[in-house]
Image (spheres, grey):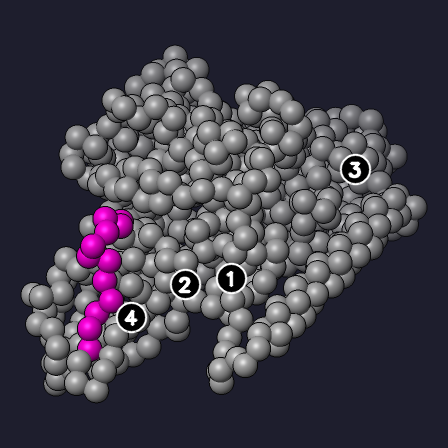
Amino acid sequence: MTKKRKILVTSALPYSNGPIHIGHIAGAYLPADIFVRYHRLKGDDVVFICGADEHGVPITIAARKRGITPQQLVDEYYVLNRDSFAGLGIKFDNFSRTSLPIHHATSQEFFLKMHRDGKLVSKESKQFYDEEHKMFLADRYVQGTCPHCGNTNARGDQCEKCGSWLDPLSLINPRSVISGTVPVVKSTTHWYLPMARFQKDLEEWLATKKDWKDNVMNYCGGWFKEGLGDRAITRDLEWGIPVPLPDSEGKVLYVWFDAPIGYISATKEWAEKIGEPERWKDYWKNPECELIHFIGKDNIVFHAIFFPAVLMAQDGYNLPSQIPANEFLNLEGRKLSTSRDYAVWVPDYLKSFAPDILRYTLAANLPENKDADFSWKTLQRCNNDELANILGNFINRTVTFLGKYFDGKVPENVKLSAEDEAVIDEMRLGLQETGDLIDHYKNRQAVGRAMDMARAANRYYDAMEPWKLRKEDMERCGAVMYTCARIIRALNTVFHPFIPFFADSLFDMMNFPGKLTDAEWDDAWKEEVAGITIKEPRILFSKLEDKDIAPELERLAKAVERMEKEEAAEKKAADEYAKSASEKAASVPSAPEGVITIEELGKVILKVGRILEAENVPKADKLLKLKVDLGGETRQILAGIALYYKPEEVVGKNVIVVCNLPFRKLRGFESQGMLLCACTDDKVTLLTTEKTDVAPGTPIQ
């Protein structure tokens, strides 16, 4: 007998700043639900955990725009998203919230242990401050002009136009999102997790994951190649989990730190709900339990690098066994845009269409290895051509024939032929292969294999011609219809993970004994059905007409029209900005040769760096290999100063680093930046900030 598995499955905690859309479902929730439903039918011990991520700047911004409190906002979206998941059949064992006391306490316990154990460092940094509202501004509370592309509405963390990751202090003409005023720069102190201390252990751990997806391993490899730097785990905000230390008023735990801990607090809450408060440890601290995170690719770094580092800093927690990250889902050939209402929102979908149609369509088109596309025509085709014409057709033919010629009762005491045995064996093999594909996170192939079973059923029905047999050989006809009922029982199980509402309805209509989940996955093909009296037959899938999806296509067309107008306006503004900058540069009298504009200068990102380590480069008389602290990260830089400075002379110096140059290989080592120096014919002098107390990472403007 196969040993039963113990599995804890999590799906990424959705932000409570808006409704769930199909991109979310395809990324982290439907694949997880399919996996969990399959393993429950296998008889495995599986717990499915999720919850609402109710902290973070996007939530405070959304609440401020609507004139309500963050708590009111998250309360609203918690209910809406919980009901959306339930409406699609996403069945969690617990859907928790990060605003609950149990989560606050768990996150603070994690922080305090790391603080007591010396795993955190405290550092001062520069941050924008809104003097009108007397508050520090987190990255998304600042907007300005991107120093790379000139986008005048770049956020403080990222420019959506060119995709560049930004430091808020690098923005040109910054403004506060709260007041619209120009913020000032002030010093603030935060706690950081020095990720470099964990890099070796993380690399060794990930090296054992031979069966993980390429997107996860490649993404992590890129981070390791750059070198992990210090990662802030606190922020200056009013909304969030308070930092549990004296003199830390107004500081909360950074959402990236507390959100993954929500998996643990949600499991604790589940254990309390079932009356076994210590049982959570059997899933988080039991080496026999597998921990599987279902996420979208934008969450890879948090689940494969940062959260494992946090777990390593605790005592005895399991690290992830698998992280099956999916790529992105596009809509009608375009990227989804929630800000421009170019999405299919789950609450709206459920008002007009059956959940199983969406589940099946997404399962058949999941972005498992590359970005995929959803279209309403594809949904219509999947419903009409596959669910209705293949799966529904076989079931309808069978139950209608049984009702008409066998009084709705499955024949008993039949003698099976070789053809009957062969198709039943096809069901056995189909269950086995479909299950194996689900277990290896290949749901597109899995749902295709399940539909192949329905195709085989139709071929069998056509080949046996029961409509002829009832006139010529009623005994043989009975054996065929008994076999068809056995096939339906197998199809009932194999489609349950993908379209559970259909499976439940079919099980009820067929009047199968017990519960659908009574039979384990591998045994469904041999479940006895003889003598069962079928209930009144009903249509399980109705066709979708063009008129049914026309309103959705019209809504998206209008959204595209709006987006194209907005994109044209943005391009016009950017062109005018560039023209204005060019005219200003041209108007400078007697400009020296090689003059650049202030905007071009703004593209150069300069920061204060502190040299932590220095050593000579073998067989390179001019080069020193330096390890430089840039505040939020540590970089390796090769500098041509070895003829003028000994390694011990530069350690501890605060230098000026050009941060956004392409990385280069020098003498086999990667150089990840450049130092500014004053150069004469016979001397190179490092430019430093020795006379001022400036923290590493401080931008120079």
Residue bounds of the magenta highlight? 684-695
Q: Are marks 3 and 2 in contact (CB under 8 Å)?
A: no
Identity of the residue furthest to the front in this view: 589
User: Is 477 colored magenta in this rendering?
Assistant: no
Q: Label 4 amino acid?
A: Leu
C-beta proximity under 8 Å, tags 4 and 2: no
Please identify, in this view, whether the residue under mark 1 or under mark 3 is nearer the observer. Answer: 1
Q: Secondary structure at mark 1?
A: loop
| Residue wearing tag 4 | 676
Q: Residue at x 39, y 73 (%)?
A: 662
In this view, the mark in front (1 or 4): 4
The residue at which mark 2 appears reads as 605
What residue is at 33 percent from the left and 77 percent from the top?
A: 664
* Label 1 sits on residue: 147
**Quadrant placement of the N terminus:** top left
Q: Which mark is residue 353?
A: 3
Question: How many numbered marks are there?
Answer: 4
Q: Which residue is located at x 70 percent, y 60 percent?
A: 573
Q: Is residue 198 above or below residue 192?
A: below
Q: Is residue 27 visible?
A: yes
At x 26% / y 73%, what residue is drawn? 677
- Which of 290 and 293 lies nearest the eye of the viewer? 293
> Which of 124 and 112 lies nearest the eye of the viewer?
124
